[in-house]
Amino acid sequence: MKWTLGYSDSIDAEPRERRAAYVPADVQLIYPQGEPINGLEYYNYGDNYIKYAWMEDKYWHFRCETAVGDLPGMTPFVIFKGLDYAYTIRVGGEVLADGEGMFTPVELSLDRYRGKNVKLDVILHPIPKKPGAPVGREEASASCIPAVAYGWDWHPRLVPIGIYDDVLFVNRHAAYIASADIYYDLADDLSSVSGKFVLDIGGEVSDKLNICYRFKDKTGNIAMSCVYAVSAHDGREITLPFYIDKPELWWCAMQGEQSMYELEIELLHGADVWDTYKKRLGFRRVRLVMNAHAWEDAPFPKTQGRTPMTFELNGRKIFAKGTNFVPPEIFTSTLDREKYRAVLELARECNMNVLRMWGGGLVNKESFFELCDELGLMIWQEFPLACNNYQDDDHYLKVLDQESRSIIRRLKYHPSIAVWCGGNELLNSWGGMTIQSHALRLLGSNCYLLDRNTPFMPTSPLYGVGHGNYNAIDADGAEMMSKIIDNEQNMIAFCEFGVPGPSPFEYIKRFTPPEELYDVRLGTSWEWHHALNAWQAPSWLQQEHVESYFGKAGSLEQLVQNGVDLQGEAYKNLFEEMRRKWPHTSAAIHWCFNEPWPTAANNSIINYPAIRKAGFYGVQAALRDQMYSARFRQMKWRAGDEIKVELFALNDLPQTMPGGRLNVYIADETGRPLTEKIAVDAPQIEAASAAMVKACAFTIPSVHKYARLKLVVETEKKGYGSEYMLIVQ
C-alpha cells in the first residue's frame, strides 16, 4: 500500500512536494534532519532536537492510494487506531471525519467508494497551543495531548505529529461486533464471579443471528459457555450475562499467579461466523483502603483522615513498591511489544510490583498492558492531565469525555489496572485546579460508570501523600534519608521522590559533541540533556551535593562516577526506610524509572533505551521481598562518631520469613572487617510485615579523608543480607 507525506501552511493548500512514507509513523521520522550518530537517532544528539521546531505549525498531509474492496455482502471500512492529534480525513476532497484526540480510534465506512481506486488523505493539524500561554507545558492545557512533549526536565520539546498506530482496511458482514464492554463483580468470599457483556452490534440486527461466547482457562478448558439467539427487537445493544464458579484470580508479582482467561465471542449467521471478538482478561478485586492509624493520626480537629493509600488485592494488603514510568520513546509510533518488554522486564527484575503511569505522559499501546498482565505489574493509570489548570471549557470537556471513555473501555479488561487517577499535581498552586473542577468531576463520573470496582483518585498527591523531595540533601543541608526517618509531615505514601544521578561517562560521550564534553556549562549538551538548569538550579548534575559527600573530584570522569554511586546508595536508603514504616506507610513509588531519550543526568535508574544505571541495583537491593535492613541516619560521618543502627526484617510475601543468625560490622571497601562483629539472632517474621530486630552501635574507624566504608549485615541465608556505603570525611 502506497503512502506519501507532505506539508503545507494551510489545510486546503496542496503540499509542494510529497515524500514516500509509511505508517505507523510520526512526521519527524519521515522528514529526518540527518543520519544516526554513535548509534543514536539524530534528534538524540547534542541540541539537534531544536531543528525540528518548525514542524509544529504545519499541516501534514498523509495520502494513501488504494483500491477499495468490493466483496458481495460486505462493507469496506478503514480504521485508524491512533491519530496524533487533530485531524481531517478526506476521500477525493470529501470530508469523512474532522476531530481531535489521540486515544479514540476512528472508524469510517468506505461503502460509497467500493470497487474504486481512491486517494485517502489524512491531514494532521498543527499541534495545539493554548492562546496566550507561555512556551512550555501550559500550551497543552486546552487539549488532551500529553504535556510532556512540550518540554520537561527530562524530555526535550519535541511534540509528535503522526499516524502513530496501525491503519486497518477491513471488510465487514451485514452485521458485526462494533464493540464489547464488560462489567463484573467478585463474590465477597472471592468464590465466584458474575457479570455481563454489553455488545454493540453494528449493521443490521436480525433474527438469523446467534451469539456464542465462552471463557477458556489457562489450560484451554472451557470455564463457561453460552449461546444467545438474537431477536430483531433487541436493537444494537445486547446484554449477555456470565457466571464462573471458583475463578482463578490474578495476583501481582510474588503474591500469586497471574491467572488469565481467554474470552471469545462469535457472531453467527446460520452456520457462518460473521465476526469474532477475542480478549484475554483476568479477575481480581482491588481496593485502596485506609492506612494503619490514618484516622488517629489526623490533625485536630480530625475532620478528615488521610487519603486511603493501602493497596488491597483480593483481600490482601500489599506494600506498593515501584516507580513512575514515563514514555519509553519520544515518538509514539516507534513503540512496540519488544521495546515495552525490554523496559518492563527490568521493572520486574528490580523487584517492583506497581508502575505509576504519570499524567504528563502517554496512555500506552495495548501490548504494554498485555505485558503488565503477564508480569504481574499493577498499573496506576493517570489521564493526560499534568501540572496545568485544565479549565471548564465546553470544547475541552467534550474531547476529554470522548478520550477518557475510550481509555477506560480499552484498558478495564486488564487485571493489571489497579488505580485510575485524574492526573498529576493538579490540586496545588502550579496546577490551580480544585476538587470542583469539571474535568476532575467528569473523570470520576466516567470511571464510576464504566469501571466502578477499580479505585479512582482525582490527582496525586492527595492529603498525606508525598511528592518530593528530589535530592540527596535537603535545602537545610540535612540528608534526605534522615528526613524520611523523622517523617515530620507524617506521610502515609511516597508516590514521587527522587535522587538525581549522572549517566555513566561513556554513555554521555555518545550524545555529546567532543568539543562540549569537558565544557560543563549552560548552552552546551550538558544543559540540553538536563544536567544543568533542568528544574531547580543546579539540577541534575548536583556537583555541589556530590562534592559534599566525596570531596572535590580530580577529574570530570571521577565527579560523574561519584554521582553515579551516590544515586544508587541514596535510593537504597530511602526505599528501605519507607518499607520499614509499613503498615503506616504503604507505598514507595519513586521518580522515575526510565527516560525517552539520553540524559546526562536525571532521577531515572535506567538510561535510554533500557540500560541499567547504578541506581537500578541500589533500588533492586532495597526491594527484595524478604531481607534484613539497617536504619541509620546519614551516609556522611567523621572518624570517632558513634553510628547507631537499628536492624529490621522486611517481609512482603504472604508467608512467614524464617529467622536466622546475623552478623553486623563495619568493613573497608574490600570487605575486611574494621570493627568487631555483633551477632544477632533474628526471630521468624510474620507475613507482610516489617519488624525491628535489634539496635546496636559502632564507633566510626579512623581512615583517610573521604574513605568509603561498608556497613555489613551478614546473614546465614543467601540473599537476605545487606551492605551500605558510609562516607568518612
Image (tube, rainbow, N blue to C red):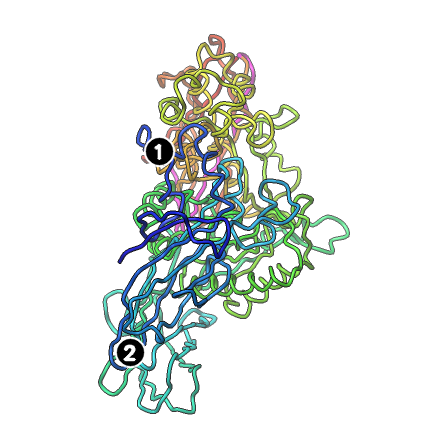
Q: Residue furthest top?
A: 704
Extent of the magenta region: 639-660
The CA distance from mark 2 to mark 1 is: 45 Å
- Please say whether residue 344 is one of the residues in the magenta stretch: no
Q: Position of residue 257 (x, y in %)?
A: 33, 57
Total marks placed: 2
Question: Looking at numbered disc 2 in the image, what kind of residue is underneath it?
Answer: Met
Quarter of the image for the N terminus: give it. Answer: bottom left
Compared to residue 499, the image places residue 29 above or below, namely below
Compared to residue 373, the image places residue 548 above or below, namely above
Which label is found at residue 34? 1
Within 10 angstroms of label 2, few (less than 14), some, or many (20 or more) residues? some
Q: Residue at x 45, y 72 (%)?
A: 183
Of residue 681 and residue 211, the one placed in the foreground of this image is: 211
- Please say whether residue 648 is one of the residues in the magenta stretch: yes
Q: Residue furthest right?
A: 301
Compared to residue 115, the image places residue 493 above or below, namely above
Q: Position of residue 614 (x, y in %)?
A: 39, 29
Q: Quadrant of residue 348?
A: top left
The disc, 2 or 1, on the residue closer to the chain's N-terminal end is: 1
- Give the left or right position of residue 646, taking residue 565 as reference: right
- Give the left or right position of residue 311, taking residue 712 as reference: right
Of residue 228 and residue 81, the one placed in the foreground of this image is: 81
